[in-house]
Amino acid sequence: MRRNYFVKLLKYMKNVYHIDHGLSRLTDRRVSPKYKTPQVILITLLAFQLRIKSMNELKYLLKENEFRSLFSSGTQLPQIDTIIDTLKSVDTIGLKSILKYTVRKAQKNKVFQNGTIGGLTVAAIDGTKFFGSNIKCCSECMKRNGHNFHSGAVMSTIGDTPTMVLGFDQQRSWEENLSKEEGELNVAKRLIASIKENYGTLVDVVVYDALACNSVWINHCVNLGIDVVVRAKENNIKSLRQIKKETNKKDPKVIWYDKDGYERVEVYESEYEMEHVDQALKFVKFTMKRSNDRYSQIMIVTTLMETGLHTLFKMIRGRWDIENSIFNNLKTECGLEHCYIHNGNAIEAILCLIFIASNIMQLFLTKRLRNQYGTQKEIVRLLFKGLYFLKYQKEYSFSTA
Ligand SMILES: [Zn+2]
């Protein structure tokens, strides 16, 4: 087997993203453990690269000894109970550093040098529930109407690939009494501040939902030096209702045909001042007609005063893609909504590992394999095939060398 994609991926993780280095620093709170943290976490990370959907699936991979060729002969491998115990107490700050390192390394390797949309590096935030249960709960659960859950926000790049998760944050139990929107906005504010701290000037623009169409969010981002695009829906801000009315009376600024899958897009724009915001803003309305004669519209508020309307359209549509493809992909393909292990530390650790796996896979597909493979399903199939060959053909095992 000339092209073992599993070996290629391992080498890529090791040589380009120095995963072994990050793993070697990890510790956990198990008492005199038989298996070392880096070994346990490496296996779990590889399992997420293989898109396991439950701990049960991992249990069978371990039972079948699928990972034995990755370690020198005679090395005993942990079983599922050890993995679960480790995840419950592993140092999540160390795991977050590995996630951060994947992004900073990509940044250094000039992955984002041309931006992701119209020359700008654009990221989107998606607030989501990570896990929920009506039966079980843990000390870090949020509780609402008898439902126990963990929720938070994820920020990832949008536009040109690779799509990379830049970071995530969880809602804390002391935020439980806030409304859903307030709680999510709080998390998003923390998240974007940490993104700025971790990656400096990497993100030029952040795209977010209507719940952030207010002075609190816009001022927060402007203070961080990041431009804002937010959706403007039904809103209790007086000035926004006013500007909508004014814009409705105008003629379209531009109309384009047959672009981005719509038959006709009319674009209306107005300059806009929002209460408690010093920064000049723009209000833009896109009315899209589909080929079946159905209409839809998107309205946005943005601090990007000079950016072309086409580019703004791509940005707000990219935000939809995060729900329709990227994030959904993580939810359905990586089992983000599955409660792998209901424990605060384990949830944080698993989220880190899912995002590290996803970033490396995105970079591997776009930079190393240059998008030869259309679907992730296909590459996962090839990875399993590679792992299988490793198991039975000793000469491909490089860890014994
Ligand atoms: Zn919980």
Image (cartoon, rainbow, N blue to C red):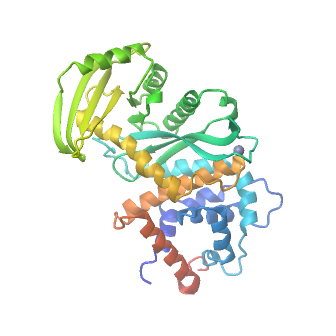
Q: Position of residue 330 (x, y in %)?
A: 50, 54
Lateral position of residue 399 relative to residue 234, left or right: right
Residue 303 spot, x, y in % from top left = 35, 25
Residue sitting at 56 percent across and 55 percent down?
Answer: 354
Identify the residue at image location x=60%, y=40%.
Answer: 151
Of the pair 256 and 47, the residue shown nearer to us: 256
In this rendered view, identify the residue nearer to me: 84 or 364. 84
**Is residue 108 at least partly visible in the picture?**
no
- Residue at left offset 46%, top offset 28%: 212
Q: Is residue 268 above or below residue 134?
A: above
Image point 31% across, 46% down: which residue? 114
Task: Give coordinates of residue 325: x percent, y percent.
Answer: 42, 51
* Quadrant of the image where one finds ligand 1: top right
Please state which of residues 392 and 127 is positioned toward the viewer in this rendering. Answer: 127
Q: How many marks?
A: 0
252 up-or-down from 56: above or below: above
Can residue 168 be seen here? The reply is yes
In the image: residue 105, left or right of residue 291: right
Q: Quick check: 78 left or right of 238? A: right
Single out the residue that lies furthest toward the right.
31
Locate residue 400: give its quadrant.
Answer: bottom right
Position of 69 relative to 279 (above/below): below
Query: Relative to 235, is 114 above or below?
Result: below
Quarter of the figure with the N terminus: bottom left
State left or right for residue 53 relative to residue 234. Answer: right
